[in-house]
Image (spheres, rainbow, N blue to C red):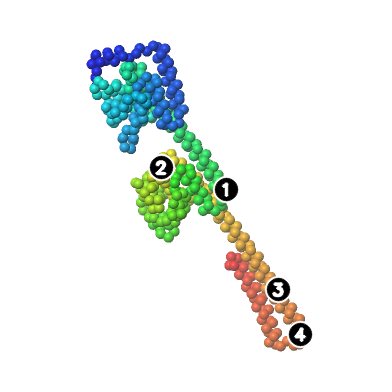
Amino acid sequence: MVDDDETQQRRHASVPEVQPEQLSRRWLRLSQLVTVLAQEASPVRRLEQALAAARELTGARAAAFVVRSPETGHPALLGDVDPGDPFDLEQELAAAGLLEPGHGAAAAAAPGSEGPPWSVHPVLVAGEPYATLCAAPSAAGAFGPTDHHLLQGLAEQLGVSIRAADALAVVTVLQGWLDASAAVRRQLLTLSDEPRVVAAGILEAVRRLTDARTVTLVGPSPLLEKNFQVRMAAGVGAPELLLRRYPKAGSLAGEAMERNVGLLTNAQERYCHHSDVLGGDVGSVIVVPFEGVDHTRGAILASRAGAAPPFTPIQLALTEDFARQSSLALELADSHAARQQLRDREGQDEAARAWQDDLIQRLFGLGVAIQALRAEADPGHETPEQSAGWARVGDEVDAVIAELRERLTSDPDAY
């Protein structure tokens, strides 16, 4: 909307003259406020402070951020107006067309002479639209060029501070995850030599690190080749999910294992076996392959409730890394269990050899005892039949000893 010369003169006449020292103070105050914004951790609180700053710097009657949802495109409004002021912020913004997509002008005015001449400035984060700063001047008069420049500078600095805060938040989350996962891996290495105990610890660690509601480890079913089976489960619904089977074809676990990459999806878009127990209240899902040293064990699936915030790509990448690192702990447990079985077998073999030697010695002693008894018997009263019987018993004992020794010499593992 273009104003006539008279209207422009009236507006310019209503703008108070700003002295150089006042101008310097306002820009200095802007830099101070920007520093405060950069230190604020809460995104909503940061926007609220920016609105207060906009009004303080320019004397604006009202200020607002219009934030458009990337999913729906619907605008969300965060405004700052004095409690006793009858100014209807949403109605005035709508009348000026500032709630419609694609407004983005540096300044706008409401249709008709009664509406305020808004000062409008986009807030860009990494070059992408984040919000729009809209300010309405006080009843005393329109904004001057300095007011527009201050608001523009505030919007630009706000975008920079939001990007810096987001980057810091990512670094903080990443460092926290790395510290926590390192501690968990150390715990896993000392947790147990039993692979199932280590696997259960891995699932519980994934659940805590990702703030997931339910986590499962699935692998090929030992009974049905075309099915997956839940081998371990942690969190809500774990007892009901354990040992549950479902088809491999088209499954998230099958895709993650086949492509050897993690997947980030939603149970409303892709089938997740957690829904078999938890129903429709399953939202965001992470799936990562869980590998052994020379073969793929299966896949780990973590899910959140439908109303919970979705997993982020960073959490997916970190979960993939944790699964790879944790699989080493499980391999170590497997290796230790195999070595323990070998030691047990060696111990059993040693005990068997000792038993075999003892048996031979007992048989040999039995033969000697029989010969001694025969020698002590009265030879004058021994019949030929008795003599033959003694001889047969002695020969039989000698034959058993000889056969046992031959068997043990030729095949030590026979017994």
Location of residue 324 in the rendering, given as x and y in whole percent from the top left corner: 48, 45
Q: Is residue 324 visible?
A: no
Q: Can you tell which of label 2 and label 1 is closer to the viewer?
A: 2
Dot 2 and dot 4 residues touching (CB under 8 Å): no
Dot 2 and dot 1 residues touching (CB under 8 Å): no
Q: Can you tell which of label 3 and label 2 is closer to the viewer?
A: 2
| Image position of 104 (left or right of 261) | left
Q: Earlier in the sequence, mark 3 or mark 1?
A: 1
Location of residue 244 in the rendering, given as x and y in whole percent from the top left corner: 42, 56
Q: Mark 4 points at which residue?
A: 378
Residue found at x 60% / y 59%: 344
Q: Can you tell which of label 4 and label 1 is closer to the viewer?
A: 1
Residue at the farthest front position: 84
Could you say which quadrant of the image residue 310 lies in? Answer: top left
Q: Earlier in the sequence, mark 3 or mark 4?
A: 3
Q: Name the residue under label 3.
A: 365
Could you say which quadrant of the image residue 70 lies in? Answer: top left
Q: What element carries label 1?
A: helix
* Mark identifier at residue 190: 1
Q: Which of marks 3 and 2 is nearer the N terminus?
A: 2
Say how many tags the image has. 4
* Amino acid at pointer 3: Gly
Residue found at x 44% / y 51%: 237
Residue found at x 29% / y 22%: 116
Q: Name the residue under label 2.
A: 308
For marks 2 and 4, give the CA distance: 99 Å
Pointer 2 local density, CA inside 10 Å: few below 14, some 14–19, many at least 20 = some
* Amino acid at pointer 1: Thr
Q: Is residue 329 visible?
A: yes
For marks 3 and 1, give the CA distance: 51 Å
| Image position of 182 (left or right of 158) | right
* Amino acid at pointer 2: Ala
